[in-house]
Amino acid sequence: MVGGPKKNPPTFGLPHYTTFDDYWLEQDELWEISLKESKKQKDERLKKINDKNLSDMQKRISDNEMAKK
């Protein structure tokens, strides 16, 4: 085998959960964090799109011949 030593992912090793309920409680917490981050990123993308569309619309209005009359 060429290269360095084999690296084990962090999922290998002794589990730090004492009960099945502890495991699912942690998974629920991680899911909640992930969901909040996804919603935040979606809102940021929508705001960026809306800001771009608004600036494009303002540019088109100012370039409009009828608006100048």
Image: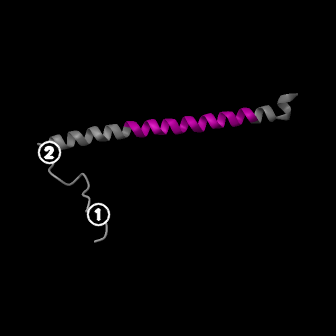
> Which of the numbered marks, if any, corresponds to residue 21?
none
- Relative side of 17 to 42, left or right: left
Image quarter in which the N terminus is found: bottom left
Q: Which residue shows up at 23% across the image and 40% down it?
A: 26
Residue 45 lies, in percent from the top left, at 53, 39
Nearer to me, 8 or 21: 8
Residue at the extreme bottom:
1
Residue 63 lies, in percent from the top left, at 81, 35
Which residues are the magenta region?
Answer: 36-59
- Relative side of 40 to 62, left or right: left
Residue labelled with disc 1 = 4
Q: Which residue shows up at 70% across the image and 37% down it?
A: 56
- Residue 23 vs 9, above or below: the answer is above
Q: Secondary structure at mark 2?
A: helix
Structural crowding at the residue carrying mark 1, measured as other residues with C-alpha within 10 Å and reported as few (<14), some (14–19) or many (≥20): few
Q: Which residue shows up at 82% across the image and 29% down it?
A: 67
Spatial separation of the CA atoms under disc 2 and disc 1? 36 Å
Q: Residue 51: within the magenta?
A: yes
Q: Residue 30: within the magenta?
A: no
Amino acid beneath label 2: Phe
Residue labelled with disc 2 = 20
Residue 29 lies, in percent from the top left, at 27, 37
- Residue 62 vs 28, above or below: the answer is above
Structural crowding at the residue carrying mark 2, measured as other residues with C-alpha within 10 Å and reported as few (<14), some (14–19) or many (≥20): few
